[in-house]
Amino acid sequence: MSTAASQVLCRLTGPAHIQAPASLDTPVARPTEDVHLDGADLGVPFPWGESWRLVFGDTDTNPERGDLYHQQDPGVWGPVEPNALASVAPPLGPDCPASVRWYVRDGRVASVLPLEPGEVSVIISGAVTVGDRVYVHAMSVGEWGDGCNPPGIHGTYCVRYGFIARSRDGGEHFDRLPTVRWSLPQHTYAPGHTYTDAGFAESALALGPGPEGAPVMWLLGAQAGRRGPLRLAWVPTTRIEDPTAYRYFSGIDNGMPRWGGDAEYTVPILPAPVGECSVAWVPVLGRWVLLHLDVRARAIVAVTARALIGPWSAPVRVLDCRSLPWAGCYGGYTYGTQPPGPRFGSADGAWLYFTVSSWATYETYLARVPTRELLAPGAR
């Protein structure tokens, strides 16, 4: 597997300084002690006005956790918000964003998609902006730990269902769409531990032309727990809230893709294992670029394709998660290569920007990778 020369630009979360190797104790865009944010992961981006907004995952708001490196003692965590929102203003240069503002209530960072009974977390895995609305795909997490781990596999998370939520105020408040969710098939891992094995338990989202040329929202779906293949679906942007409008890739027939209305009969577009993922169309390459965590390679990798149904290229290693300082890295949520001005990026599309999280520090970082280095040898 070839390796691209990624650069970590700055840290987006946490206090002014953390005890960590130099490459992890990078300059922080904005220290977050004043909003009671000690650590957060993910950072799923979506555009809003002249800024980007980032939705983070489980957010530790306990100032007593301190700045210990590799602090995994759950006794010093909490209270934990299931998600958090930040607004990141341009310009995005070789260092850090010009400003980072956090959504707060009563002076503290606050969730934008709150928990419901039976949930330990709500994790947002993809986001798009359609007119004056923001749509996200999220996971209803029932428990952490080994309750849903297949034999010999550890580190998964137990998801009750995946779903779409909508915001009318730029992501500050989300409402779940009760009929747009994925919960089947169900699997009982152990007595009292029944969760979904749905292929769209978590999904990356992207906008673009659909099979007939009209604007659609694409969903690149994966099973919970970073262990399954990747599947594909689309829905017209005018019907995102209509569960009957979703169409799922079910294979090739006489050289043409088949699209059906049942998520259980999809055909994978990328083999397992696919973890957290994001996708963006990169004009300078004329290809889609998909970033995802590969737990087998223990790396964040990139694959490219001219069409979302594939064929996808061989993977290129974007970030090695096998050794310190990046042991346990995950995520890889890309902004793509945006035009200059109110959007982030380089004028020539030379860089792909993305967020990455470190389990060692439980913080999120902004990084970039040379776009041309994402093409694997022999990519078509």
Image (cartoon, grey):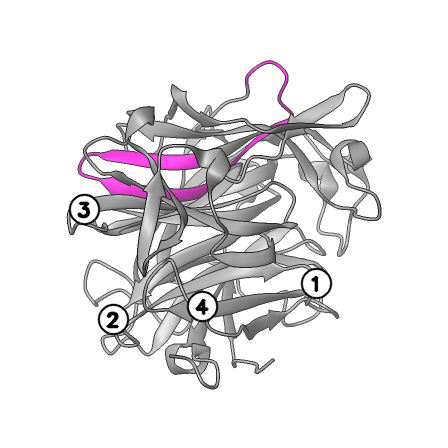
Comparing marks 3 and 2, which lies closer to the viewer? 3
The spot of residue 318 in percent (x, y) is 54, 72
At label 3, counting other C-alpha atoms closer than 10 Å, the crowd grade (few under 14, some 14-19, many 20 or more) is some
Q: Name the residue under label 3.
A: 215
Helix, strand or loop for disc 4: loop
For residue 35, side relative to residue 69 (left or right): left
Q: Which of 81 and 167 is in front in this view?
A: 167
Q: Mark 4 points at which residue?
A: 312
Q: Does the magenta stretch include residue 130?
A: yes
Closer to the chain start, of discs 1 and 3, is: 3
Q: How far apart are marks 1 and 2 (CA)?
A: 30 Å
Amino acid type, label 1: Arg
Residue range of the region highlighted in magenta in the rendering = 116-137
Comparing marks 1 and 2, which lies closer to the viewer? 1
Locate the N terminus by quadrant. bottom right
Locate the C terminus by quadrant. bottom left
The spot of residue 146 in percent (x, y) is 80, 36
Q: Distance between the residues labelled 1 and 3?
A: 35 Å
Q: Name the residue under label 2.
A: 283
Helix, strand or loop for disc 1: loop
Helix, strand or loop for disc 2: loop
At label 4, counting other C-alpha atoms closer than 10 Å, the crowd grade (few under 14, some 14-19, many 20 or more) is many
Instruction: Judge whether residue 26 can be spotted in this image.
Output: no
Amino acid type, label 3: Pro
Residue 112 picture quarter: top left
Amino acid type, label 2: Pro
Q: Mark 1 points at which residue?
A: 296
Q: Looking at the picture, does residue 224 appear above or below residue 12?
A: above
